[in-house]
Amino acid sequence: MSSDTTLPVVTDALVIGAGPVGLFQIFELGLQEIHAHVVDVLPEAGGQCMALYPDKPIYDIPGLPTSTGRDLTQRLLQQTAPFQPQFHFKQRISGMQAQPDGRWLATTDQGMSFLTKTVFIAAGVGAFVPRTLPLPELQVHESTQVFYTQEEASSAQGQHLVVVGGDDLAIQAALAALTHSPASVTLVHRRSTLDASPEWLQAFDQAVAAQKIVFLTAQISQAELTNQRLSGLKTELTDGSSRVLACDQLWVMLGLSPQLGPLANWGLDMSRKQLAVNTENFSTSAAGIFAVGDINTYPGKRKLIVSGFHEATLAAFGAAAYLRPGQKIPLEYTTASPRLHRLLGV
């Protein structure tokens, strides 16, 4: 990831979204000798496949009778490798402005900017962002005391930790925290039943029985601060009573939700919160901006990964024609083209 946030990254193509369709877009652009930078709000490639069902089987990918989201992502990354795409994770495109020379200036919420000739929006149903608690006062403590992934959290050694959630991810986080010798671990869930696999439930029940973890059926209603730091959480229990939990760290493990976000304000033609495209090349209403995958809409649209692969292919041809006006864009086959073999390193 680039560390310079002062000067814009100059590129021929910016792909927004590193899900399966975005990754295949990189590959198809590479075949047209168009190098791409890629921005995704998630911490890794794979999009919805990795965020929601990394280990569930997928049965409708051509040539792969069965594949998990994780395996598909790894295969696609391997396929893009010859073209050396540059990924910028944990960043969300917050602005898009047309420039006098026809390029686009895209800015992220982390201060990066890209000056690009073409943009490929492969954002699926929107940017996947963590589900948060309805407590605005927690926002100032994000990344210091409030975390949405276990990987980003600080060590909980000697601290009071509260984990919110009721699925495998939340239970695994609570159990993993025990290895850091915390002062206490409390799992808070709005229901008394947990939606987790039997093996994790068994390990969790054993930890609760051994008084290593406290399981509380409640909802968090208020954050308490001491010297401007999060120090406690007021919870409302199902019997109508309330209880205050000591809290030095709060891990909110409520999963991810898609949000259209700033894209809705870029002035692109939309229909029912999706981008309208020309199916000849999957261009949007703005010159140089293309949309592929679940984010777009057109007559007969089907939200399938294989449909997105088709769209990415035609969008790459459209981009080549847009970047090289007046030049013939030949149709070549990877089985026989020396040029494509050179690009692929085979």
Image (spheres, grey):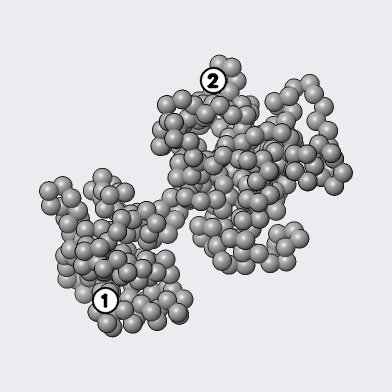
Q: Tell me the element at label 1.
A: loop
Q: Tell me the element at label 2.
A: loop
Question: Residue pushed farthest top?
Answer: 100
Q: Is residue 235 visible?
A: no
Q: x, y percentage for residue 239?
A: 21, 74
| As drawn, 156 above or below 284 | below
Point 80% across, 42% down: residue: 341
**Relative to residue 152, is residue 223 drawn left or right?**
left
Q: Nearer the viewer, residue 198 or 5?
A: 5
Asked where in the image residue 162 lies, by quadrant, the reply is: bottom left
Point 39% across, 69% down: residue: 172
**Which class describes the residues within 10 Å of circle 1: few (<14), some (14-19), or many (20+)?**
some
**Which class describes the residues within 10 Å of circle 2: few (<14), some (14-19), or many (20+)?**
few
User: In the image, which is nearer the foreground, mark 1 or mark 2?
Assistant: 1
Label 1 to label 2, Cα distance in Å?
A: 58 Å
How many badges with numbers are in the image? 2
Q: Which residue is mark 2?
A: 99
Question: Residue pushed farthest front?
Answer: 345
| As drawn, 56 above or below 296 | below
Q: x, y percentage for residue 46?
A: 56, 53
Q: Which residue is mark 1?
A: 212
Q: Identify which amino acid the numbered label 2 is placed on.
A: Gln
| As drawn, 128 above or below 98 | below
Question: Residue pushed farthest right?
Answer: 336
Q: x, y percentage for residue 86?
A: 56, 39
| As drawn, 146 above or below 322 | below
Q: x, y percentage for residue 181?
A: 26, 68
Point 80% across, 30% down: residue: 329
Numbered tag placed on residue 256 in the rendering: none
Q: Is residue 249 visible?
A: yes
**Relative to residue 332, is residue 81 drawn left or right?**
left
